[in-house]
């Protein structure tokens, strides 16, 4: 029996490599490091909470099989999860977790990670609650977030000194607000290690305050927050109509601001549109800089996809990146969900990531393609009706019969799917949105004056309706 943790893990890797795709092996097993072997218990170090959850969700049975084959039937596995990368001269902070074969965590919930840092002790500075994976290096800049990123970087270099105090970042869900404020906090910690930086969601702040009232510890609650050098509050819109919480935050805000401490907030809307807030608090939200983040454009989405896949150690073809960037044009969070699902499909099906796999994955998770009447089917139906091929509809030719069929397919794509005009144009040979607008208008105009054309549209609509039932 092997007794050294390194040799045990090397033997396990040999067995695992024969059971998973090469890309999955490189992505999910190579980064794992063996820590120690205590009897039949092997402890491995994984680089993040997400990594840990992914391994437990998808590969625990393979790990267990390889361990049993290497160590014996009594083999067990423990994880050390890196939750804080630590300073250059210190070891990373890790949390040890047993293998969860019963799929239960400490709180009895299934497949949920227990955050080891809770602000139970409010009489002394605690951990910052920052996620170390978020940084300015991994935050992709574009027109959609340039002002917010520039302001955030300035604040990170000189917290409490610039005129951007408070810094209010607002925008819809999933656009990167939380990533940016974590990046600011991590940059401050890296350059000004003696400063107490604290990230807290509005929900957690509210719950802590309620708990302090129940336990007659309001003063301790306030004293804790008055020690913070940079306070980051996420989603302040949830303070709406909570008068006592607003009053407490008002006093904390005043003290920190007057003491030259930095305040950073996020919201789903600008201060002028926040309802259910005291006017005196809203006026303070407007003291510094309000910067918005909006939906990323195509080029920014391309860069986000490239960076995130590169960070996972995965290279995907350019046509797949373009397809994803055109198809998922809502927010970054949905885009990240698509990428995680794509990686999972590639891993579980032991397939390389290509355009066909991307399309299959998207059908399961994106509302735009959930309907069976997708752009591909519309193209196929229209092409068959006019005795053409789908490639004809995507070609650069200006033959009249092909142009008419292409315009009709674009018209139905606009009607039956939720794709943007840019996305529709992309699926027709990379044409721009103005071409789609012209196509839709041309079809509408011709329907009004040409009876034969109107009948053709009616027949095609019936074919598409049958498919959609």
Image (cartoon, rainbow, N blue to C red):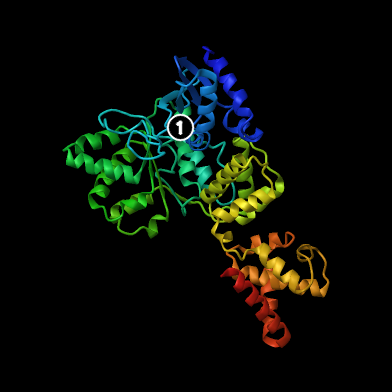
Q: Which image quarter is the C terminus in?
A: bottom right
Q: Is residue 112 left or right of residue 12?
A: left
Q: Residue at x 74, y 60 (%)?
A: 429
Quick one: 75 or 428, which is closer to the camera?
Answer: 75
Residue 138: tell me if it is visible.
yes
Q: Name the residue carrying label 1.
A: 188
Q: Residue furthest left?
A: 216
Q: Quadrant of residue 455?
A: bottom right
Count residues near mark 1 (Cα–Cα under 10 Å), then give few for <14, some for 14-19, many for 20+. many
Relative vertical location of residue 239 with respect to residue 398 in this rendering, above or below: above
Quick one: 7 or 321, which is closer to the camera?
Answer: 7
Residue 446: tell me if it is visible.
no
Q: Residue at x 65, y 60 (%)?
A: 423
Q: Is residue 363 left or right of residue 273?
A: right
Q: Secondary structure at mark 1?
A: helix
Q: Residue at x 42, y 37 (%)?
A: 161
């Amino acid at each position: 029996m092997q007794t050294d943790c390194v040799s045990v893990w090397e033997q396990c890797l040999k067995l695992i490599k024969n059971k998973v795709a090469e890309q999955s092996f490189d992505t999910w097993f190579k980064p794992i490091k063996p820590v120690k072997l205590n009897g039949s218990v092997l402890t491995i170090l994984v680089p993040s909470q997400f990594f840990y959850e992914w391994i437990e969700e998808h590969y625990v049975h393979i790990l267990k099989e390889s361990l049993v084959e290497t160590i014996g039937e009594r083999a067990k596995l423990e994880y050390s999860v890196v939750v804080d990368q630590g300073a250059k001269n210190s070891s990373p902070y890790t949390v040890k977790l047993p293998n969860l074969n019963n799929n239960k965590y400490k709180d009895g919930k299934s497949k949920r990670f227990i955050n080891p840092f809770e602000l139970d002790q409010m009489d002394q500075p605690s951990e910052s609650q920052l996620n170390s994976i978020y940084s300015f290096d991994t935050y992709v800049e574009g027109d959609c977030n340039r002002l917010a990123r520039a302001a955030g970087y300035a604040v990170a270099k000189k917290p409490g000194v610039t005129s951007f105090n408070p810094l209010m970042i607002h925008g819809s869900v999933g656009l990167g607000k939380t990533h940016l404020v974590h990046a600011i906090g991590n940059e401050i910690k890296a350059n000004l290690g003696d400063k107490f930086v604290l990230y807290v969601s509005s929900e957690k702040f509210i719950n802590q305050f309620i708990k302090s009232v129940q336990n007659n510890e309001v003063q301790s609650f306030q004293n804790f927050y008055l020690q913070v050098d940079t306070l980051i509050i996420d989603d302040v819109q949830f303070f709406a109509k909570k008068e006592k919480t607003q009053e407490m935050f008002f006093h904390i805000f005043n003290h920190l601001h007057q003491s030259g401490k930095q305040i950073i907030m996020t919201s789903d809307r600008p201060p002028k549109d926040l309802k259910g807030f005291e006017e005196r608090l809203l006026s303070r939200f407007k003291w510094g800089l309000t910067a918005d983040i909006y939906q990323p454009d195509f080029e920014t989405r391309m860069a986000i996809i490239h960076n995130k896949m590169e960070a996972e150690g995965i290279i995907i073809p350019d046509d797949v990146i373009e397809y994803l960037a055109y198809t998922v044009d809502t927010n970054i969070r949905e885009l990240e969900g698509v990428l995680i699902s794509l990686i999972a499909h590639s891993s579980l099906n032991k397939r390389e990531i290509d355009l066909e796999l991307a399309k299959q994955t998207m059908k399961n998770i994106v509302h735009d393609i959930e309907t069976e009447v997708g752009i591909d089917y519309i193209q196929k139906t229209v092409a068959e009706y006019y005795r053409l091929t789908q490639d004809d509809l995507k070609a650069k030719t200006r033959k009249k019969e092909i142009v008419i069929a292409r315009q009709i397919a674009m018209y139905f794509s606009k009607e039956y799917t939720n794709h943007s005009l840019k996305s529709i144009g992309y699926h027709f040979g990379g044409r721009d949105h103005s071409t789609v607008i012209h196509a839709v208008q041309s079809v509408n105009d011709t329907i009004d004056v040409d009876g034969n054309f109107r009948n053709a549209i009616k027949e095609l609509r019936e074919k598409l309706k049958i498919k959609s039932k």
